[in-house]
Image (spheres, rainbow, N blue to C red):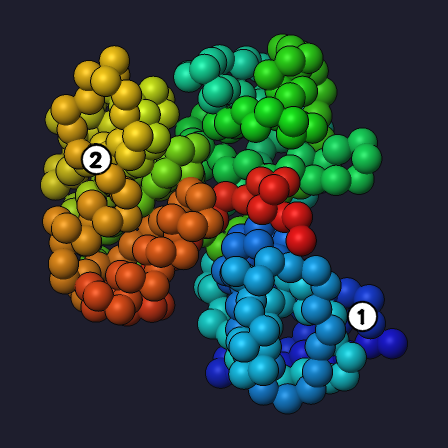
Amino acid sequence: MTFQITVQPSGSQFTCEADETVLSAAIRAGIGLPYGCKNGACGSCKGKVIDGSVEHKPHQQRALSDLEKTQGMSLFCCAVPSADLTIEAREVGGSSDYPLRKMPTRVAAIQKAAPDVAIVKLQLPANELLAYRAGQYIEFLLKDGKRRAYSIANAPSFEGPLELHIRHLPGGLFTDHVFGAMKERDILRFEGPQGSFFLREESDKPIVLLASGTGFAPVKALVEHLMHLKSTRPVRLYWGGRRPQDLYMDELCRAWETTLPDFVYVPVVSSALPDDGWTGRTGYVHAAVMQDMPDLSGHQVYACGAPVMVDSARVEYSAQCGLPPDEFFADAFTTEADLAV
């Protein structure tokens, strides 16, 4: 059975199979619904069902509460229609400009940037290019049918291997492999580009980049893309980690401060040890933004990292700093633990 989906306020329409999620059908049809994890953990694809009904696959309560369900809200990455639908969602222009591709890739290099962070560089087949927007991600296709998503850490203008930043999560099937058995010249398969986290180039508003841990990867791509565009928009980068070693490209960020016009870098550490000798900002990275910039009403914020950080920033920046909700763009990094329900 096939259902008709209508998106308001745009009026876009697409079809959805009975066993297909609304988001999957939208991506297949080239409709730019916002999304991140696609697994019911980050909440980026949340919208409202105005007419019709859906059944939800397992998802995190944090991403969609029972109260929100009674109000008609839905996670479209987990919502399977049981009737024709009219939904309310903000469409993202440009998110479907580049078609999804499944490609083989060869591991070109594995470099340890920190004890638990590897920079993995991927070489595409000869004469093959992956067209993507800075900030988007790819999904590795594993042999067991599972997928693992990682943001591309370099801008599309970069001519060379794709760069990924992978944190080791002990017990994680894929990251144990990366930090244990993976070696140069190994062949992997991935699908991409994916995600609606990318620079809104039509805006001239000042930018706040907010990252925690390896959430720095897509932020790095955004900065490189701004450099490629020769953008003059003011940019403030806040990067948070538990300890100084978590800011594994600190020197690069400090170099940006000296070479880019109107660029400010603020590193923040939440759990430094005495031996670390940390003398910089401490506490939660999203709170540091609020301390420095109590009025965000004229800004855009791009946030990437742990779901709790992204969720806190989304709520508090709007409620306390006047940030318009549609000027907050996020990619919440999810792990196997986040996806467990």
Residue on which disc 1 sits: 17
> Residue reaching furthest right?
1
**Vertical placement of 108 versus 317: above or below?**
above
Q: Residue at x 67, y 79 (%)?
A: 5
Label 1 to label 2, Cα distance in Å?
49 Å
For label 1, the SS is strand
Q: Residue at x 35, y 56 (%)?
A: 312
- Hey, which quadrant is residue 145 in on the image? top right
Residue 18, position as x, y percentages in the image: 82, 72
Q: Nearer the viewer, mark 1 or mark 2?
A: 2
For label 2, the SS is strand
Q: Residue at x 44, y 44 (%)?
A: 306
Residue 339, position as x, y percentages in the image: 63, 48
**Vertical placement of 303 versus 110: above or below?**
below
**Vertical placement of 18 versus 84: above or below?**
above
Mark found first going from the N terminus, 1 or 2:
1
Residue 327, position as x, y percentages in the image: 31, 63
